[in-house]
Image (cartoon, coloured by chain):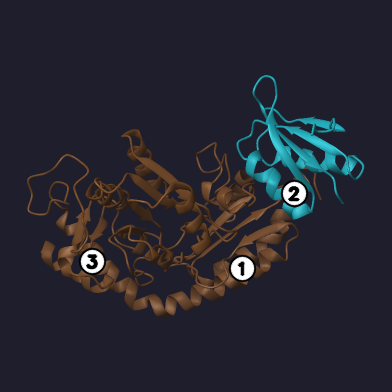
Amino acid sequence: MSEPVPALEVDCRGMACPKPVIELSKAVAAVEVGKTVVLVADDAAAAADVQAWCRMRGQEYAGSGTTADGVPTYLVRRVS
Amino acid sequence: MLDNARAVVAECLGVRPDEVTFTPSGTHAVHLGVLGLLAGRARQGDLLLASSVEHSAVLQAGSWHTARGGRFETVDVDAHGRVSPDSVAAATAQHGVPAVIAIQSANPEVGALQPVEVAHVMESPLFVDACASAGRLPLPEGWSAAAASAHKWGGPAGVGVLLVRRSARWRNPFPGDERIDERAVGFENVPAALAAAAALRASLEEQVQLSAEHFSLTTMLAETVRSIPDTQVFLAPGDRLPHVLAFSCLYVDGEALVSELDRLGFAVASGSACTAGSLEPSHVLAAMGALTHGNVRVSLGRDTAAADVHRLAGELPGLVERLRARAGVS
């Protein structure tokens, strides 16, 4: 099954915590329920904090990946 | 005189004097304990299993072990930072029965006491890093080797304690020293060992009262933090260290929080990346699936005034609100 194209991409390269999670929350609020947001972040805390944010906010963590140039990406689906 | 210090420490910790060795640090005691048990089990196997929330001293010993051809795997913890019979069983099912298993007595970052008895079901010798609890709580049961650190109970820095059961098979993992006690490294610092023993006795004597006071203060502080929106309080249900409280605040910069608290006269620690002199967030918080940013760890000592803890509780809600407003979130 291929992932749907994210409705929004947030590029947080070079930003330190908690900025990527703040940007993620704004982006998820801006898409419709059922749509996904992809966060691009090289901050080491993002791996733990994106998942923790999803649990706190009741949103769905839909997995991680990397960009073509090797920067971690995190996919989040708005479910509420 | 060294035997005197040894006898006092043994009595305070409930072990035999010949099971006590003074080391140059708690970290070194951990390294000798973990790697010495592994060396004693070299014929049986090379797998070291440890909880994923061990102090870095244990994790570094694991890295040293793997660099020399051994295997090192971890046991998962729950959201409170605790291992369980199920998580230990899952780890052994996946990796095999360990040559040595290491489980801390208590987690120094979030205060959860570990159910170290989960290791008793297996034959593998147990190493207990007791640095966070020794001098405050009795040692758990069933270990083959354990480690403690004098400065954690108010003793001098530079004194660690390695405990090895007489029945344990322990072999020196490092180049040997021609000493009577093969576990000792060079000549022990006798005055420091005596000071460590005296501090341990004093700490245990005041512990009953101090623990009750600290328990109620950290419980009060936890309630205050929970009243702040979007916070995670890491106060393990059941047995915990009474003097530790950690929490994370969503959308708050941990470094800003720590420096603002410092400006207000509160010295606190943090497990957030960029604050702890490290770019990586706390491996303990990450293993718990917890929020790692906006993290603060409050640790109460014998000299901490109750009034200061109440003042901290009064300042925190407004401070978190100001920092969120500064970051553009409300």
| Residue A76, above or below B122 | above
Q: Provide the chain ID for the residue under circle 1.
A: B
The kind of residue tagged 2 is Cys
- Subunit that carries the residue with mark 2: A
Q: Residues within 10 Å of mark 1 (few under 14, many from 20)?
A: many
CA gap between label 3 and label 1 equals 32 Å
Q: In the rendered view of the protein, which quadrant contains the N terminus of chain B? A: bottom left
On the image, numbered disc 1 is attached to which residue?
B221
Residue bearing the label numbered 2: A54
Can residue B191 be seen here? The reply is: yes
Where, by quadrant of the figure, is residue B17 drawn? bottom left
The amino acid type found where label 1 is placed reads Leu
Quadrant of the image occupied by residue B265: bottom right
Q: Which numbered disc flags the more N-terminal residue, 3 or 1?
A: 3
Q: CA distance from mark 2 to mark 3?
A: 48 Å
The residue lying at 67 percent from left, 67 percent from top is: B224
**Is residue B111 at all visible to an observer of this figure?**
no
Q: Which residue is mark 3?
A: B197
A31 over B209 or under it: above or below = above
Rendered view: A16 above or below B103: above
Residue type for callout 3? Ala
Secondary structure beneath label 3: helix
Q: Which chain is brown?
A: B
Mark 2 lies on a secondary structure that is helix
Residue A45: percent from left, percent from top? 62, 40
Instruction: Measuring from the top left, give residue B115's x and y in whole percent.
Output: 45, 67
Palette colour of chain A: cyan
Residue at 13% from the left image edge and 51% from the top image edge: B182
For image coordinates 12% across by 49% down, the residue present is: B187
Residue B263: image x %, image y %? 58, 51
